[in-house]
Image (cartoon, rainbow, N blue to C red):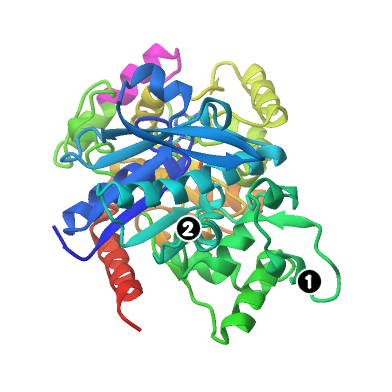
Amino acid sequence: MSKNLSILLVGYEAAPFFKKGGLGDVMYSLPKALRRQGIDARAVVPYYHYISKIHEEKRIGEFVLDFDRKRKTIGVYEGFFPKSDRTPIYFLENKHFLGILAGGHLAIREFAFFDWAVAEFTAWLIKNNRWHPSIIHCNDVHAALIPLLLQKKTNLNIPTLLSIHNLAYQGRGSLHVLDLLKIQDEETKEIKSKKPVNQLNILGEGILHADRVATVSPTYAKEITSHAYESDPIHLFLHKREKDRKEKIEVLGILNGIDYDVWGPQEDNLIYQPFSVLDWKIGKNKNKQEFLEEFSLKDRPTFCFIGRMARQKGVDLILKIINRLMARNVNLIFLGEGNRKIEKSVEKAAKKYPKQIRAELSYSESLAHKIYVASDFIIIPSRYEPCGLIQMIAMRYATIPIASSTGGLKDSIQDGKNGFLFKKNSSKALFDVIKKALHLYTRPKEFEKMVMTAMNTDFSWSKSAILYKKLYDDMTQPK
Ligand code: ADP
């Protein structure tokens, strides 16, 4: 294991302990992949009730901090990721602030608490001679105050990397949060030059104070720093950072990978019958038939949608073409939960086409695996997609992605080779490309070639873990 690099990855979720989306996958698979590169990588997440109910971890200590002028005790627990060669994961416990997943605009208080707890936890680790991270890798808005808090609250001089997994969640809210933390951040108030700022923007604070900023695909890195995002508050922070440091900011885009121990038809005990690349045709067909029987669907070309029911994911674009799509005699399976209005519109479509549509409006890991493998095509009509993991997972299961040409979808799908891309935000383009896909489906040789290419595309972490290692090395070089 590298003596020099020891990385603490901080996030609000980590599979398989607790997962709501792609961040959970990354918080599990990236530390594992980094350890394979000889890096001592570990993770830290809140010890939510849902986790502590199922996973009883070892309590290794506690520390206190003064939040909102009250003393709060934080319990520290240590465990290991399963199937990971004992990759350590720490859990921070505080029933009031870290008991359940925080959401909504008031959640910035919980994020602030977590971030301060992580800063103090790092100091606690070092003080107790347990471990000394050389870099803190903060993931997304939930961890974005850590760079500021390390500077203001501890005397630790540890470089920080902020990874943006989704710019849409910036954690905006009252500046009062800074009072709870008992810190002054005058820079925040200056940001809009003449106009005083009356809101805190947690992601913006991360951009200002982190040593380096990265995101989860090269195309998304380009998109968010381009004119297209000029009116987004992120640009205020990027410009301020550039002005303060007198250097051009580089937002490095490193494509996420997926964990081949979790995702792959060969050793998956959640699907009906495992299979390998060599016998994919027989294996996939068996899985498809079992699924169709279980869900009382006829044997037809089968499409699916898997993902959060959020505007970002573009379910409405599918619903716009639903009549024309159903007229093509296909099945369509939805798996997702989230915005109630979107869920209702999906339910309505399912009621209208009871013989062809199934809508599972819940979060189910086992169902996700079955749907990935049983479908011929997965539709991903995202309005924007920082990276996206579902296209990579689907391809491992011999399922062809039909996706918007944006962000990480563009970086992982080669149109016409291992999937299809269409112009984002256009239901017409979506329908046109579905017609193309169905046409290909009727030409087995060509279709099978595409499936084989998809299955053999490398989405493991190996390439990206090397890029992270390079970045970490660069961050720890003496200047
Ligand atoms: P995002 O992080 O924006 O939600 P990603 O494509 O990066 O999207 O990752 C989504 C992850 O969450 C995948 O592992 C996918 O299988 C999983 N997922 C999303 N919705 C569900 C659901 N309803 N049930 C089970 N797994 C889900």
**Residue 52 figure quarter:** top left
At a point 29% along the width and 47% down the height, the residue shown is: 42
- Amino acid bearing label 2: Thr
Q: Depth-wise, is mark 1 or mark 2 nearer the camera? A: 2
Which quarter of the rendered picture does the N terminus lie within?
bottom left
Residue 312 rendering spot, x and y as whole percentages:
63, 46
How crowded pointer 1 is (Cα within 10 Å; few <14, some 14-19, many 20+) is rated as some
Q: Where is residue 332 in the image (x, y as percent from the top left)?
A: 51, 29
- Whether residue 67 is visible here, answered yes or no, is yes
- Residue at the image position 56 percent from the left and 51 percent from the top: 141
Give the residues drawn in magenta, as a range.
Answer: 286-298
Closer to us: 316 or 310: 310
In reply to whether residue 26 is colored magenta, the answer given is no
Nearest the eye: 263 or 426: 263
* Figure check: 298 above or below 258: above
* Spot occupied by residue 454 in the image (x, y as percentages of width and height): 30, 51
Horizontal arrangement in the rendering, residue 153 relative to residue 235 (left or right): left
The image shows residue 198, relative to residue 267, as above or below, that is below
Tell me the residue at 31%/72% (across/down): 476
Magenta highlight on residue 289:
yes
- C-alpha separation, residue under disc 1 versus residue under disc 2: 28 Å
- Lower position in the chain sequence, tag 1 or tag 2: 2
Label 1 sits on what residue type? Lys
Residue for badge 2: 154
Quarter of the image holding residue 15?
A: top left
Question: Considering depth in this image, is 160 or 151 the residue closer to the camera?
Answer: 151
Marks 1,2: beta carbons within 8 A: no
Apparent side of residue 20 relative to residue 340 in the rendered image (left or right): left
| Residue corresponding to mark 1 | 192
Q: Is residue 327 left or right of residue 197?
A: left
